[in-house]
Image: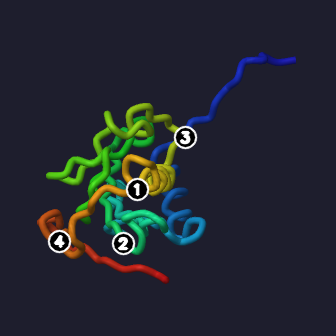
């Protein structure tokens, strides 16, 4: 006999991020979305890079989008900040900064602790296929230099 109350185990932040890192290193689904840490020496595991390969039958087809995700010390209780390095025209992205605006991206606006960086990237890819985004005119490729971080090196790669 015990209490019938539901006790929920809360996974500590670093364990959660280690799980996400392991999953990101193994690859996700069909390989059109990936993510990993920017700096292996970052003991706080805050700075991450994501990649989305544009979905077929959209204006995004064949394009490779680089994103920065920053997990503050309150992640996963609060969402990471998400910013496109590659220029993109989407309804939830600030055109000047590349920031995914939480108020325009429901997953960030209604964040749940169970959500992951993988979930964010997959939802952004799904949103690229939505009626309001699938045919929006896109900036020409190769002009992401305006958003490259001033510190460090940004590596761009893709496994095909």
Q: Which residue is mark 2?
A: 63
Q: Residues within 10 Å of mark 3 (few under 14, many from 20)?
A: few
Mark 4 vs mark 3, CA separation in Å = 35 Å
10 w.r.t. 31: above or below: above
Residue 83: percent from left, percent from top: 27, 54
Q: Helix, strand or loop at disc 3?
A: loop
The reply, left or right, for residue 85 in relation to residue 52 is left
Q: Which mark is residue 119?
A: none
Q: Of discs 2 and 3, which sits in the foreground?
A: 2
Q: Residues within 10 Å of mark 2 (few under 14, many from 20)?
A: some
Q: Helix, strand or loop at disc 2?
A: loop
Q: Which residue is mark 3?
A: 114
Mark 2 vs mark 1, CA separation in Å = 13 Å
160 w.r.t. 43: above or below: below
Q: Of discs 2 and 1, which sits in the foreground?
A: 1
Q: Which residue is mark 1?
A: 134
3 w.r.t. 136: above or below: above
Q: Which residue is mark 4?
A: 143
Residue 14: percent from left, percent from top: 46, 50
Mark 2 vs mark 3, CA separation in Å = 29 Å
Q: Mark 4 or mark 3: which comes first in sequence?
A: 3
Q: Residue at x 24, y 73 (%)?
A: 141
């Amino acid at each position: 006999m015990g209490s019938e109350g539901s006790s929920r185990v809360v996974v500590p932040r670093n364990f959660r991020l280690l799980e996400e890192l392991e999953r990101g290193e193994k690859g996700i689904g069909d390989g059109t979305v990936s993510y990993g840490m920017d700096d292996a020496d970052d003991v706080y595991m805050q700075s991450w890079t994501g990649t989305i390969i544009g979905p077929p039958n959209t204006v995004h087809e064949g394009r490779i989008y680089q994103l920065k995700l920053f997990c503050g010390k309150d992640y996963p209780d609060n969402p990471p900040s998400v910013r496109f390095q590659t220029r993109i025209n989407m309804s939830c992205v600030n055109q000047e900064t590349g920031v995914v605006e939480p108020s325009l991206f429901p997953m960030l606006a209604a964040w749940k602790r169970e959500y992951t960086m993988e979930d964010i990237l997959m939802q952004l890819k799904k949103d690229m296929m939505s009626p309001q985004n699938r045919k929006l005119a896109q900036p020409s490729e190769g002009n992401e230099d305006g958003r490259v971080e001033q510190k460090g090196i940004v590596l761009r790669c893709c496994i095909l």
